[in-house]
Amino acid sequence: MVTGAGSGIGRACTHVLADAGFAVAACDVDEAAAAAAASGTGAVVPFAVDVTDDASVAALAIAVAARMPPVFAVVNCAGWDQTLPFLETDPAFWQKVVAVNYLGVVRVTHTFLGAMVERGAGRVVNIASDAGRVGSSGATVYAGAKGGVIAFTKSVAREVAARGVTANAVCPGPTDTPLFRRQPERLQAALERAIPMRRLAAPHDVAHAVAYFTSPGADYVTGQVLSVSGGLTMAG
Ligand SMILES: NC(=O)c1ccc[n+]([C@@H]2O[C@H](COP(=O)([O-])OP(=O)(O)OC[C@H]3O[C@@H](n4cnc5c(N)ncnc54)[C@H](O)[C@@H]3O)[C@@H](O)[C@H]2O)c1
């Protein structure tokens, strides 16, 4: 199951996981985008969900249970931000950033984790951000939420490690998606220049790291944080 499946990294995760043999529930608040992500691929089924809404996520669990095999992996990829200096932000903005980027991950994980624990098998892969590891000016509250996602992932990993479920975080660096392209052009160019590999990540670069954490080869890997950033961040 992939949230934020309608665009960018989530869409790439949907396709890479389908290519790896998974049946994929492609979930997004933008129903048409989820449907587009699913079109032309027999293994992908679109679902509408708003990860900020309890009732919507509860309804998703029922809909997915009715139409899909038991959920083995949850990829929390839905995210949102707007570049603004911290001093120009207000409480409504903070609440939206935290609702989507942090509590959305908490809510979806809480909804699907119990069944994984009961089956003794499962994977949680949370898309955090290098902003959450090293900070990011103009993305201050978002960076805090993503740092929260990293700490949450490690804590979930500890709680369920003996129950056959792993939890890991993938931290994209600047990645060529609509979210990235909404930033001021000067900032986009500066970020691209700073990347040692001298190019933005493509969404599939990130999706392959996600696929690794869902693969049998990652059975013994939990509570880890993997940056996919062309060398921009080399966090210790
Ligand atoms: N693009 C980057 O440079 C970059 C860098 C670091 C981390 N990330 C993270 O990667 C993830 C994917 O980002 P992207 O760049 O592909 O963005 P994107 O804007 O292309 O896609 C995000 C998707 O999430 C969906 N979404 C937003 N709010 C939602 C909600 N409440 N419920 C359900 N779906 C919702 C959107 O409809 C959209 O389809 C996000 O968590 C983002 O924070 C992106």
Image (tube, grey):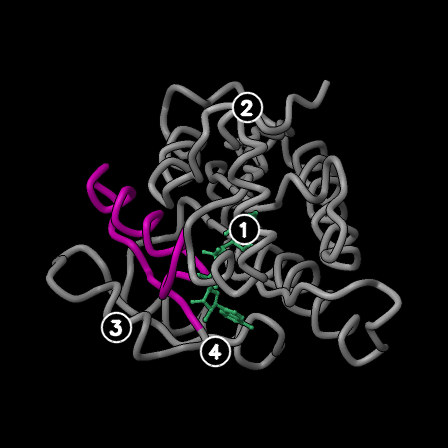
Task: Name above or below for residue 106 compared with residue 34.
Answer: above
Kindly state the secondary structure of the residue where label 3 is placed.
Answer: helix
Residue 186 screen position, x and y as percent: 58, 54
Residue type, numbered disc 1: Gln
Q: Nearer the viewer, mark 2 or mark 4?
A: 2
Residue furthest to the front in view is 186
Query: Could you say whether the residue bearing mark 2 is in a helix, strand or loop?
Result: loop
Q: Where does residue 21 sit, x and y in percent of width and height?
A: 20, 40
Q: Which mark lies nearer to you, 3 or 2?
A: 2
Amino acid carrying label 2: it is Gly
Which numbered dot is residue 35?
3
Establish if 231 lies above or below 69: above
Which residues lie in the magenta part?
A: 1-28
Real-space Cα distance between discs 4 and 1?
38 Å
User: Does the Cβ of the disc 3 residue fall within 8 Å of ligand 1?
Assistant: no
| Viewer-side residue, 180 vs 159 | 180
| Residue 59 location (% of width, % of height) | 48, 78
- Labels 3 and 1: the sequence-earlier one: 3
The numbered disc on residue 59 is 4
Please give the residue where the numbered disc 1 appears in the rendered image: 188
Quadrant of residue 163 within the rendered picture: top right
Give the mark, 4 or 1, whose residue is nearer the N terminus.
Answer: 4
- Please give the residue where the numbered disc 2 appears in the rendered image: 231
Q: Quadrant of the N terminus?
A: bottom left
Looking at mark 1, is its residue's CB closer than 8 Å to ligand 1?
no
As helix, strand or loop, the secondary structure at mark 1 comes to helix
Q: Is residue 57 magenta?
A: no
